Image (cartoon, grey):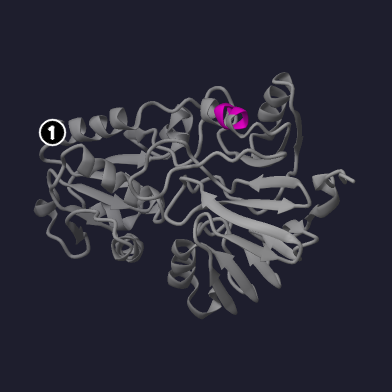
């Protein structure tokens, strides 16, 4: 006798900590410490310290160790991409999400029902991490950081060309670009190298450790130098990368007449760029844009969509217009600035 597969809402619960799998007794990206945590990637709004057991890819675990030290977790278990791991009555598989080093979607199979939790993801090529792999499923749990039609990101090569053009245009100034330490920094470096820029890139001290970690994982970022203590004139005609908050603080005052840039999907919003004092807004995102979100819904073939965070209403409305069932989970604790 063929049993009907259980409805996902009967075995996946939304609790204060986030998504909880009942038959597996684990949380996914819990917002506070949990007994057993499955972690999609290393950004601080998904990977948190203090969990008793952590299951994640080796790349994500390495990032957590670098960021949290001994607080990364009591027991750290690495999961290889494609490896099926049995937890309770649930088969769990980590598959690439294309977001940052080690990022993964979490595929859960339980008694004929399949749910995929995407974590954060993008659909564009990125030489620093494995590309997103769509998974056919019954329910697709997606982010919606850029879930509005206005967010249609330009080609990445176009934005890198704008940065290099500014570099040539202002040989006596330096280009200081705000980037987040995990993912965006390393991706921007790789895009520069792919565009033929092989000069040293100068780094704010807060970016060095994670660049070293990427290098240890076999990702060659090209020649990098610390910007600390470098003579002002030496930085003329150079590219300097720094955390977004550093481009306008005292640290940046010693730079030679900097052209202030920022690499983020939010640079599509001109008012935001202007408010941040950004002269060179680079629309480079580590999240799917509107068209890529919709393409992903189609690629998964999921009849039901759950939206964790972001521009939920617009994506839900469009999913329903596509004939899908969709609802917002309205999870808290996810930051949208780390793009």
Kindly identify the residue that appears in the image at 35 percent across and 50 percent down: 128
Residue 287, image x, y percentages = 49, 40
- Image-quadrant location for residue 50: bottom right
Residue 292, image x, y percentages = 52, 29
Circle 1 Cα neighbour tier, 10 Å, few/some/many (<14 / 14–19 / ≥20): few
Q: Is residue 99 left or right of residue 23?
A: left
Magenta-tinted stretch: 294-298
Outermost residue on the top side: it is 321
Residue 186, image x, y percentages = 33, 51
Q: Is residue 229 left or right of residue 332?
A: left
Kindly identify the residue that appears in the image at 16 percent across and 42 percent down: 197
Assign a secondary structure to mark 1.
helix
- Image-quadrant location for residue 142: top right
Kindly identify the residue that appears in the image at 46 percent across and 65 percent down: 58
214 or 170: nearer the viewer: 214
User: In the figure, 72 relative to 194: above or below?
Assistant: below
User: In the figure, 70 relative to 338: above or below?
Assistant: below
Read off the residue under disc 1: 168
Residue 180, image x, y percentages = 41, 51
Q: Is residue 312 left or right of residue 177?
A: right
Q: Is residue 300 left or right of residue 222?
A: right
User: In the figure, 63 relative to 132: above or below?
Assistant: below
Is the magenta region chiefly helix, strand or loop?
Answer: helix
134 or 257: nearer the viewer: 134
Visible residue check, residue 190: yes
Outermost residue on the front side: it is 1
14 or 267: nearer the viewer: 14
């Amino acid at each position: 006798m063929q049993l009907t597969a259980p409805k996902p809402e009967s075995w996946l619960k939304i609790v204060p900590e986030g998504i909880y799998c009942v038959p597996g007794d684990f949380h996914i990206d819990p917002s506070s410490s949990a007994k057993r945590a499955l972690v999609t990637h290393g950004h601080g709004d998904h990977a948190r310290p203090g969990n008793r057991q952590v299951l994640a890819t080796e790349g994500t675990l390495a990032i957590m160790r670098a960021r949290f030290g001994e607080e990364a977790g009591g027991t750290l278990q690495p999961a290889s991409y494609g490896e099926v791991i049995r937890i309770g009555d649930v088969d769990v598989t980590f598959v690439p999400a294309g977001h940052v080093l080690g990022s993964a979607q979490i595929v859960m199979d339980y008694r004929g029902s399949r749910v995929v939790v995407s974590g954060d993801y993008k659909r564009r090529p990125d030489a620093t991490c494995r590309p997103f792999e769509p998974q056919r499923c019954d329910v697709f749990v997606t982010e919606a950081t850029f879930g509005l039609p206005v967010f249609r990101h330009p080609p990445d090569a176009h934005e890198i060309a704008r940065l290099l053009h500014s570099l040539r245009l202002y040989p006596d100034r330096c280009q200081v670009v705000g980037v987040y330490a995990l993912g965006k920094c390393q991706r921007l470096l790789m895009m520069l190298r792919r565009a033929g820029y092989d000069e040293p890139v100068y780094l704010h001290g807060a970016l060095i450790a994670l660049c070293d970690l990427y290098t240890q994982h076999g990702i060659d970022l090209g020649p990098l130098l610390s910007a600390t203590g470098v003579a002002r004139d030496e930085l003329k005609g150079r590219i300097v990368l720094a955390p977004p908050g550093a481009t306008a603080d005292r640290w940046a005052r010693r730079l030679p007449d900097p052209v202030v840039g920022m690499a983020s999907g939010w640079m599509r919003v001109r008012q935001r760029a202007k408010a941040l004092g950004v002269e060179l807004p680079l629309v480079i995102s580590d999240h799917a844009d509107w068209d890529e979100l919709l393409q992903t819904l189609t690629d998964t073939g999921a009849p039901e969509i759950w939206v964790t965070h972001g521009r939920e209403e617009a994506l839900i409305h469009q999913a329903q217009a596509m004939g899908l069932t969709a609802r917002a989970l309205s999870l808290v604790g996810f930051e949208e600035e780390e793009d």
